[in-house]
Structures are given as structure tokens and as C-alpha cells.
Image: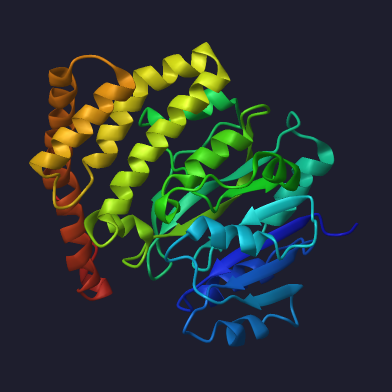
Amino acid sequence: MPAALAIIIPACRIRHLGDALRSVAAQTDQRFSVYVGDDGSPEPLEAVVATFRPQIDIHYQRFQPNLGSTNLVAHWHRCIALSKKEPWLWLFSDDDVMEPECVTRFYEAIEHRESPPVDLFRFQLDQIDERSARTVRWPDHPPYEKSNDFMRALISGEKRAFKAQEHLFSRRIYEDTGGFVNFPKAIYSDYATWLCFSANNGVCTLSGPRVRWRTHPLGTTSGRKGAHRLQWHEAARLFIEWLAVFSKRQGPEAVRIFQRFGRDFYFRELAQFRPVLTRAERQAATSFAQRIFGGSWIAAYVHLHYRLVHHKFIFQRLIKPYRDWKTRRASTPFSQSSARPK
């Protein structure tokens, strides 16, 4: 059977590229082709890719100029364009890891039709750190989820992870919808795109093997505290506006979900910014929320302040002590690091 799966890796950094490609080469089912799109990196990515050519069907393309720094979604699109009409696409990354049975599990699902016909699959997710040690095992997704249930889980604060790298999608839905929704720095682009791709047929979860998603200081998520702060804020507003239109297109139930959970989702996202929002930013966010969701300006302002204070409390009482403990633990010999935070 010819390969039905293209694994797309937009690449820019060499640091963990070898780990990502080793996890691909270790797949127990080799019916796939890999396409690595070098986003004008100053690092020798091609040399790393070349070491895997004897093991897997891998293709490398260097692009100029760098596009990811200004339009990351456009770079994703040009990387996907490298593929050769395989009916299924997996947009992976240059620093994450897939467990060895992932491709096998995918083929089992499409060949044995274990789920209703869908255009979007996903794996369960673990979170790892710079040293590839697991830091979080995220709660499992349900075996199957309709689009409205997916949207509710996404914006209501369910303790699940929704990342780009654990999703596989059909080329048909990718082409029919025009690809990934484009937001600044691709922030929330995966959220919006998965909702689009699941709009008609939902999303199926592949049980068993997991994807390991890596967090590190160079990741986009750190931008809430640094150079990409303005883009984060703009992307949050654009995503909420996009979600308002999408929910209307999906029908009354989706609109109710959006109206019930959308404002709190927006404020929860803003509460994670460091340093905290300025007075002008708080006022602008409140006015935006009132325009989208209605209600009084004062009620929205109080809601935003509740989220800011709540997140500060959680950060100071729970998150910061845990991070401090991890730092101390990493700096002590293994034999002395078994103590737990009190």
C-alpha cells in the first residue's frame, strides 16, 4: 500500500530537530513521507536531515527569505505544498517527539474505520521539558467529539491540552477550507483551524501512543511575557472575533456556547500576560468584550479584574512555588532531590 501520510516539519532551529526526526524514524509503520521546510535558518539543518535519508523517505527544502518571523502560517502553507498529494497530512514540529506506534495507530483507524468518517484525528498529549523529561501528562481527550463539544472544551477552561502537533487532517478538508486560519505569529491559528476542520464531522482521538510536546524558553508561548506581547493581545482579539462569526455559522447551540464561555476565555488569556495589563490595556479589553458579548461595561471590567486577581493568586500560591522547587531540584545531586514541595 502506498504511503497515505505526509509528515510536514517546518524547521528553524537545530537544537531538537534530531530528536524529532529520530522519533519519526523509529515508527513501527514506515508508510509515510517526511517533508522538512527550512525557514531560512542560519543553522545547518540540512546536515541533520541528511543523516536520516538512509532510514526514511525524507525530503528537504530550504526557503528564502525567512517567513516564520513575520507570517508563520504562510510558512506552514509553503511547507505543506512540498508534499505529493498524500491524502493525509500531519503538521509536526522541529522539537517535539512522537511515540513509535503513532503511525501504526493512525493506519489502524483509517483502515478499520474505527470511528465515524472524520477529517481530523488527534493523539493524546504529554508535555516534556528541554531535557525530554515528562513534566505533565495531560488529561485524555474523549474518543470522539463533535465540533460544538470541541469548542466548549476549548474555551470553557477544561484541563486538556490543544496543540497543533498532535493533530492529523485530511488533504481534502485542508484544501476545501483554504488551510490554516491566519493570526499574528500563528497564535490561536491551530484552535481556529481545528474547529474549521471538525465543523461537519467532529474529531476522533487515537488511543494508545502519545505525542510529546516540548516547552522551552524559545517557544512562542513565552511571548506573553516578552517581545510578542502585542501580537498575543491582537491575536486574542482576532480569535474572539473569528469565533463569533464561526459560532453563528454553526448554529444556535454554538452561539450559546460562545456567549457563555467566550468572554471568560478571553479574560483568562489576558490574565497570563507578564507584566500584568496596564490600565489602558484593561480598559481597551473591557470595551472590546462589551462590544462582542454585550452587557454593561462595569460588569465586564469587574470580570476582567476577577480573572487578573485569580490568576495572580494561583501563580503566587501554586505555580511559583512549584517552579522554585523544580529549579532547586535541578541544581542538586540526584540523591538529594527526592524531597517534595511542602
Q: Tell me the colour scheme of the image.
A: rainbow
Location of residue 158 (image quadrant) = top left
**183 lies above or below 152:** below
Residue found 77% across the figure and 61% down from its top: 29
Looking at the picture, tell me which residue is in the foreground, 187 or 296.
296
Q: Seen from this angle, which residue lies furthest right?
A: 1
Q: Residue 281: x, y in percent?
A: 16, 41
Q: Is residue 247 left or right of residue 293?
A: right
Looking at the picture, tell me which residue is in the foreground, 23 or 6.
6
Q: Residue 84: x, y in percent?
A: 79, 62
Location of residue 226 (image quadrant) = bottom left
Q: Seen from this angle, which residue lies furthest left?
A: 279
Judge whether residue 92 can be spotted in this image: no
Judge whether residue 178 can be spotted in this image: yes
Looking at the picture, tell me which residue is in the foreground, 203 or 248.
248
Q: Residue 341: x, y in percent?
A: 17, 53
* Count of picture labels: 0
Q: Residue 74: x, y in percent?
A: 55, 58
Q: Is residue 294 left or right of residue 142?
A: left
Give the quadrant of the N terminus: bottom right
Q: Is residue 311 left or right of residue 94?
A: left
Residue found 17% across the figure and 67% down from its top: 328
**248 lies above or below 202:** above
